[in-house]
């Protein structure tokens, strides 16, 4: 019990500084893995409005290159565990919160958030008014930042380090988060009673074969694809259409991922080569890739959409889904052909959230129907895709 209690203890490192590229400075207290001015946390400072699920968010590969500010004031109360991972590592560069909850209270917790960050070489900062930071990002836009722990930090030097990062525009993070070799995914969704269900080889062999192009794919997407009835093979984002075709797929999935879709011409070219040959489904970055493959442009949003409470309207049914979002870029629909349907729109800013090309048997969603964390309003889209493949 003593060992468990120590693992669940939140540990603070002492004072630290967050500096933004525009010269704004916030002072607080650091936690996690100590990073000083010689090795600061560097990334684009963004905010996420989810009320829960910080472990899933931190391990989402789409957050590579970013420092996440949580708008929920108290973070850390449920600790961390070995099951709620969305990838094999923690991808967020850093974390910013108002208060690190001192008590970890959840029967599934095996370690505290501060211990979890320390084990993964990531540092966070807390103890200042994150509302002011979020308001600043909302008004000025997401921007690069730097965090360093220590007394009497040279803030001018830290600001210079933030500015030296440039912008997220033009940056390819996909190659850093994609798998290096293909692999088969067999794990289904989690339940409290049984944990994750693994599907047998005998059950998989008769299923339609789905190739998932890994641009930074979340585990829960793969789990739901398996649960829907697919046999799933995950391949690197650098694979071309010939390599994918050689695996004899029945359908294609292009995943979420980090960075600027305009910096991924190799992925877009693969999508263009394969469109019309197989049913196609894209989520988040996969939506942007489909958009570019169909001739559209993409653009950087002022501060992006990140959270578990964003309303999206289905333009055909009129239904509003409460969705999970995590993207800093969007598809500009101006250059989409008339044969391409705009299926969903974000009710906060009217940006494009879904497209469909019926003649090519292709559709995509900007938001995350797999949630994790978040509401399950949009999960039926996976079944919609499966039915497209098998009918």
Image (tube, helix red, strand yellow):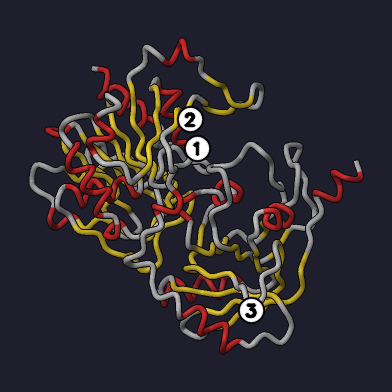
Earlier in the chain: of badge 1 and badge 3, it is 3
Q: Which mark is residue 223?
A: 2
The answer to whether mark 2 and mark 1 are in CB contact below 8 A is yes
Quadrant including the C terminus: top left
Give percent across and percent down for residue 14.
Answer: 77, 73
Asked whether disc 2 touches disc 3, contact meaning CB atoms under 8 Å apart, the reply is no
Alpha-carbon neighbours of circle 1 within 10 Å: few (<14), some, or many (≥20)? many
Marking on residue 46: none
Q: CA distance from mark 2 to mark 3?
A: 40 Å
Residue at 51% in and 43% down = 374
Earlier-in-chain disc, 2 versus 3: 3
Above or below — where is 79 with respect to 280?
Answer: below
Residue drawn 9% across the image and 48% down it: 337
Q: Gap between marks 2 and 1, in whole Å?
A: 6 Å
Residue drawn where x is 54% and y is 57% of the image: 92
Q: Are marks 1 and 3 in contact (CB under 8 Å)?
A: no
| Mark 1 → mark 3, Cα distance in angstroms | 34 Å
Visible residue check, residue 18? yes
């Amino acid at each position: 019990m003593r060992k468990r209690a120590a693992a669940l203890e939140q540990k603070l490192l002492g004072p630290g500084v967050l500096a933004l590229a525009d010269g704004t400075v916030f002072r607080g207290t650091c936690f996690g893995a100590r990073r000083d001015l010689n090795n600061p946390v560097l990334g684009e400072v963004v905010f996420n409005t989810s009320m829960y699920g910080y472990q899933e968010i931190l391990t989402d590969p789409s957050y590579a290159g970013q420092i996440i500010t949580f708008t929920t004031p108290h973070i850390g109360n449920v600790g961390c565990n070995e099951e709620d991972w969305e990838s094999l590592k923690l991808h967020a560069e850093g974390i910013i919160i108002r208060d690190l909850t001192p008590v970890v209270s959840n029967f599934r917790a095996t370690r505290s958030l501060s211990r979890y960050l320390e084990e993964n070489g990531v540092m966070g900062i807390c103890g200042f008014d994150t509302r002011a930071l979020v308001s600043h990002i909302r008004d000025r836009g997401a921007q690069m930042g730097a965090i360093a722990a220590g007394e009497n930090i040279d803030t001018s030097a830290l600001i210079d380090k933030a500015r030296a990062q440039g912008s997220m525009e033009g940056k390819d993070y996909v190659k850093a988060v994609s798998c290096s070799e293909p692999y088969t995914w067999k794990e289904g969704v989690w339940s409290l009673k049984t944990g994750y269900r693994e599907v047998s080889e005998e059950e998989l062999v008769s299923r339609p074969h789905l190739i998932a192009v890994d641009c930074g794919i979340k585990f829960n997407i793969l789990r739901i694809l398996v649960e829907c009835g697919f046999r799933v093979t995950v391949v690197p984002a650098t694979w071309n259409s010939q390599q994918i075709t050689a695996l004899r797929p029945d359908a294609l999935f292009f995943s979420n991922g980090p960075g600027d879709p305009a910096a991924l011409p190799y992925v877009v070219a693969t999508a263009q080569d394969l469109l019309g040959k197989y049913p196609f489904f894209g989520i988040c970055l996969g939506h942007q890739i489909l958009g570019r493959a169909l001739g559209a442009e993409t653009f950087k949003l002022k501060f992006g959409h990140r959270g578990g409470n964003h309303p999206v309207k289905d333009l055909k049914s009129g239904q509003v889904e409460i969705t999970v979002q995590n993207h800093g870029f969007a598809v500009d629909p101006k250059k989409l052909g008339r044969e391409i349907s705009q299926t969903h729109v974000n009710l906060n800013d009217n940006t494009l959230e879904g497209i469909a090309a019926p003649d090519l048997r292709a559709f995509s969603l900007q938001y995350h129907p797999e949630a994790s964390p978040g509401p399950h309003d949009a999960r039926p889209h996976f079944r919609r895709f499966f039915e497209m493949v098998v009918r």
